[in-house]
Image (tube, rainbow, N blue to C red):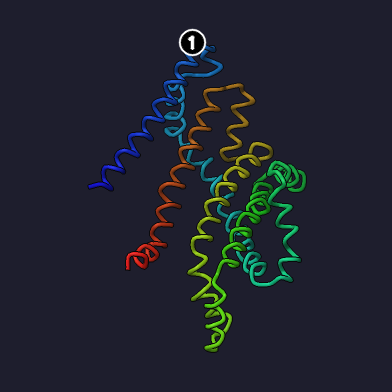
Amino acid sequence: MRDTGERWRRWAWRLAGYAVFLGAWQGVSTFLVEGFVVPPPRAILTEMGGIVASGQVWIHFGATLRTIAIGFAVAYALGAAAGMLMGRSRWWEAFLSDWVLATLTTPGLIFALVAAMIFGLGPAGPVAAVIVTSFSYVAVNVVEGVKAVPHELVDMARAFGRGPAPVVRHIYLPFLAPYLFTAVRYGFSIAWKIATLSEVIVGTAGIGFMMRQKFQEFSMTGFLAWVLLFFAFALFLERVVVQRGMRRVLRWRVTAAVR
């Protein structure tokens, strides 16, 4: 009963936050600026409904998701491999650490512009920008997880004659699970941003492409409609897909803690 009441209170505060935001938005649109500069929420919702009904949302969200799926899958594989190497070997850490730090601290806009200059118009540029930008976030999280693995367990496994593959599978991977999911959350959020930014610059389809088109038409209603659709979809993926997947995969940790 206590958990149910707490859940309802959280939802009540969340809905209150949305209500305050929409009320402030309506007030700004009504009393402070002209409606064509900041359209009221009803106009944006109507535009969003038109976009969904026309089928454009599926075309352009599909294009952005393809970019993210390809780019982030490659970045995650490379980042996880680099993180494992850096965490387990000082030599690999010395070899790769400066490059990982450089890509981590460089603004994503730079990678988007460089990819645009190299690949030009089309999907290759956004994919390359997603790979380079997301790679470092994955690598850093995996490195921290590897370094936090208890060395006593590794030494004990080796003392019993276990090879590298069983050690990685039965010690490193279970211990790294929270770090790997954290890498997914942060890396995926970065991938969303850089994919959309790249599409704004050189995309021929996708959410960013439509934002650029509405900006060029000076259609604030259309622009904000695509922005809010982007926000809603990203929130859905984070809350429903990523967080639920994390809780399902890591449910054994809760069971072990109870025991």
Q: Is residue 22 left or right of residue 214?
A: left
Tell me if I can see residue 77 in this picture.
no
Residue at x 49%, y 16% (from the top left corner): 28
Decide which of 249, 125 is in the foreground and name it.
249
Residue farthest toward the left in the current orientation of the protein: 1
Residue at x 57%, y 22% (from the top left corner): 219
Q: What is the x, y in percent for residue 42?
A: 42, 21
Tell me if I can see residue 111 in this picture.
yes
Decide which of 105, 234 is in the foreground and name it.
105
| Numbered-mark total | 1
Q: What is the x, y in percent for residue 109?
A: 70, 41
Up-down relation of residue 33 to residue 195 (above or below) = above
Decide which of 36, 182 is in the foreground and name it.
182
Up-down relation of residue 223 to residue 11 (above or below) = above
Residue at x 70%, y 48% (from the top left corner): 105
Q: Is residue 162 left or right of residue 26?
A: right
**On the rendered image, what quadrant is the C terminus found in?**
bottom left
**SS for tag 1?**
helix
Q: What is the x, y in percent for residue 73?
A: 57, 58
Residue tagged 1: 31
Decide which of 185, 212 is in the foreground and name it.
185
Residue farthest toward the front in the current orientation of the protein: 152
Up-down relation of residue 91 to residue 215 (above or below) = below
Q: Amino acid at mark 1?
A: Phe
Density class for disc 1 (Cα within 10 Å; few <14, some 14-19, many ≥20) is few
